[in-house]
Image (spheres, rainbow, N blue to C red):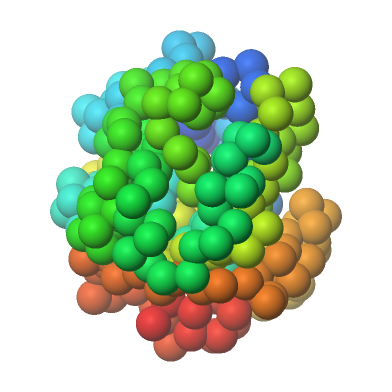
Amino acid sequence: MTVLARAHAANIVVRHAQPESDNDKRQQYFVELLNLALNKTEADFGAYQTQACAVRMMQDRALQQLQRKRCIDVVWTMTSLERESKLHAVRIPLLKGLLGQRVLMIRQQDLRRFKDIQQFNELGQMRAGQGMGWPDIAILKYNGLPVVEGKTYEGLFGMLKRGRFDYFPRGISEIGPELKQHQRDGFVVEPRILLSYPAPIYFFVNPEDTRLAERLEMGLRLAIDDGSFDALFEKYNYHKLADLIENRLVFKLRNPSLHPKTPIDEDKLWLLPNNTQ
């Protein structure tokens, strides 16, 4: 039974995951964007409600629940070939490619260790931290960067604090709020290095929910065309984050899991034209 069939005829319910912890503020923008896309398509698809799943879970489990059509109807996450083989990707980059522009969260006392890095192989002597099941792990390893995996999102910050790894690559849209949440831990943004790789984040739905996928794509494209997508993007000041990329030492990484149908040629979908190439 699809999400549309399960809900009342006049009011569908679209369920999404909770934040992974009380400190996790990453999903506020995506919940608003989900509601924006659904609102834009009410005339064609009917009234709706969005609702957080009652059970808190990690990203991998949320994707499993989506695949099984239990508790969750839509997930927003970074794409990969594996994810697109199991789920229906709505191929509109929700962060306009910002997620793949990664600065390094490090401990303040480690600033000196990173100061003299000039070559990519020098960064390869450091250990990155990532969450289990994140597609970034395969990207970093493919490009020769050692990775230490953590079980939970919140636990990764504790691992960094204890020196279990040397740096935590964070999307430039993520790191500001995370530093505020962990301001007592002595973390800082490494001021020089940028890891850059194509990493669009999409809405994913169950492959059987084709009508929901159609609705989300239509709603997002309507929002892009009428400017309301950009208005929400700017509400969170994401449009200003491109400035953080300037004058950095950029290490470009290859993403071996990028789907060939990634819409890299639609410049209006990206903050930086053709930034996924």
Q: Give the image quarter of residue 60.
A: top left
Pick whichever, 18 or 52, lies toward us: 18
| Residue drawn at the location 38% of the way across and 38% of the way down | 130
| Residue drawn at the location 34% of the way across and 21% of the way down | 151
Q: Position of residue 82 (x, y in %)?
A: 18, 51
Eyeballing the image, is 220 above or below 71? below
Q: Give the image quarter of residue 233.
A: bottom right
Eyeballing the image, is 61 above or below 176? above
Q: Is residue 7 left or right of residue 42?
A: left
Q: Position of residue 55 (x, y in %)?
A: 45, 12
| Residue drawn at the location 40% of the way across and 57% of the way down | 123
| Residue 115 appears anywhere in the view | yes
Eyeballing the image, is 232 above or below 20? below
Quadrant placement of the N terminus: top left
Q: Position of residue 20 (x, y in %)?
A: 51, 23
| Residue drawn at the location 36% of the way across and 42% of the way down | 127
Pick whichever, 6 or 266, lies toward us: 266
Eyeballing the image, is 16 above or below 222? above
Q: Is residue 6 left or right of residue 133?
A: right
